[in-house]
């Protein structure tokens, strides 16, 4: 029983970690796009 709970908790932590990574991904993509727009604007 204890091992089962441990495995479950480990799984939850992994899920949470992946969820946080997925949530951060769009922000970094947005940042990259803004950087591209900024560098294009800087070149003109």
Image (tube, helix red, strand yellow):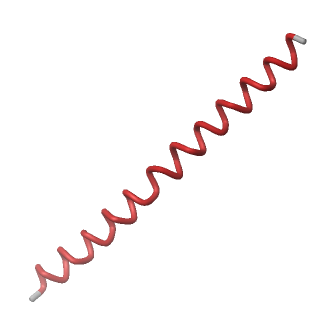
Compared with 37, 30 (above or below) is above
Residue in the image at 25% along x and 69% along y: 34
Question: In this image, 33 relative to 17: left or right?
Answer: left
Total label count? 0
Residue 40, above or below 24: below
Residue 40: % across, % down: 19, 83
- Residue 33: % across, % down: 31, 72
> Which residue in the rendered view is the most extreme toward the bottom?
44
Rendered image quadrant of residue 32: bottom left
Q: Position of residue 4 (x, y in %)?
A: 87, 20
Q: Quadrant of the C terminus?
A: bottom left
Give the percent coordinates (x, y) of residue 5: 80, 17
Residue 10 in the figure: left or right of residue 23: right
Q: Residue at x 22, y 77 (%)?
A: 37
Give the quarter of the figure containing the N terminus: top right
Q: Is residue 18 left or right of residue 43?
A: right
Q: Nearer the viewer, residue 40 or 3?
A: 3
Residue lying at 73% horizontally and 27% vertically, measured from the top left: 10
- Identify the residue at image location x=74%, y=32%: 11
Q: Is residue 28 left or right of residue 4?
A: left
Q: Please determine whether, in this image, residue 23 is positioned above or below residue 1.
A: below
Q: Residue furthest right?
A: 1
């Amino acid at each position: 029983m204890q091992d089962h709970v441990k495995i479950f908790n480990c799984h939850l932590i992994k899920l949470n970690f992946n969820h946080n990574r997925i949530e951060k991904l769009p922000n970094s993509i947005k940042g990259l796009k803004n950087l591209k727009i900024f560098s294009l604007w800087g070149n003109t």
